Image: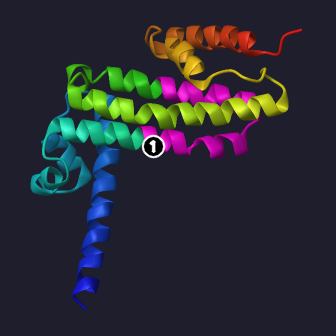
Amino acid sequence: MAESRHEPRRADALKNRENILQIAHDAFAEDGSTSLNVIAKRAGVGAGTLYRHFPTREALILAVYQHDVQRLVDAVPTVLAEHPPLDAFRSWFETLADYVRLKHGLGEALHTAAVQDVVNETYAPVTAAVGLLLRACEGEGSIRAGIDPGDVLLLMGFMWRVGPGEDGREQARRVMELAIDGFRPRG
């Protein structure tokens, strides 16, 4: 009977954690310097609840990063189901670029050894997601076989280095098309 009393608390704690992560994602997108107290207030939880889940600002930023990367990786099958493979490739990389731009906006908060460890941990799932997109494109014949997902991820890094605003996004789209042209079957 004691276990059943703890289950709702665990479910509530998980719900609170997910809510805090989403609120923090949105808050950091608006302003990378948003305070933890503002995030707690927006999430409708006390500061103690937020600090119980995320004892430091860095812990919250890392959790938001991991959560967002996992959502992005998990989205690949849905994006492929909703779009032809090459359009899914384009859409997914545009979403990735938007996310990385947000991450870079957090500045120094994302330049510690702990952060680098988390970034390194997310590399394999992201390259696996890129691999799924590449295989789908290979299957439809829009790109040639054998392109390395890590190479594509490195190449597509230009997308989060373009200037801000619609001009930067348009430049990213143009350069992405140049990259895609390079992926096409030869001959």
Q: Which residue is mark 1?
A: 70
* Residue 8 picture location, percent across and down: 29, 76
Position of residue 58 in the picture relative to residue 180 (left or right)? left
Position of residue 6 in the picture relative to residue 155 (left or right)? left
Q: Which quadrant does the C terminus fall into?
A: top right
SS for dot 1 = helix
Residue lying farthest to the left in this orientation: 48
Q: How many marks?
A: 1
**Which class describes the residues within 10 Å of circle 1: few (<14), some (14-19), or many (20+)?**
some
Position of residue 163 in the picture relative to residue 4 (left or right)? right
Q: Is residue 112 above or below residue 11?
A: above
* Residue 178 picture location, percent across and down: 68, 8
Residue at image x 49%, y 23%?
Answer: 97
Please state the extent of the stretch shown in magenta in the rendering: 69-97
Residue at image x 77%, y 24%?
Answer: 145
* Viewer-nearest residue: 74 or 173: 74
Q: Which quadrant does the N terminus fall into?
A: bottom left
Please, what is the three-letter code of the amino acid marked with disc 1?
Answer: Gln
* Viewer-nearest residue: 172 or 73: 73
Q: Is residue 81 magenta?
A: yes
Residue at image x 32%, y 34%?
Answer: 118
Per the picture, the main secondary structure of the magenta-coloured stretch is helix
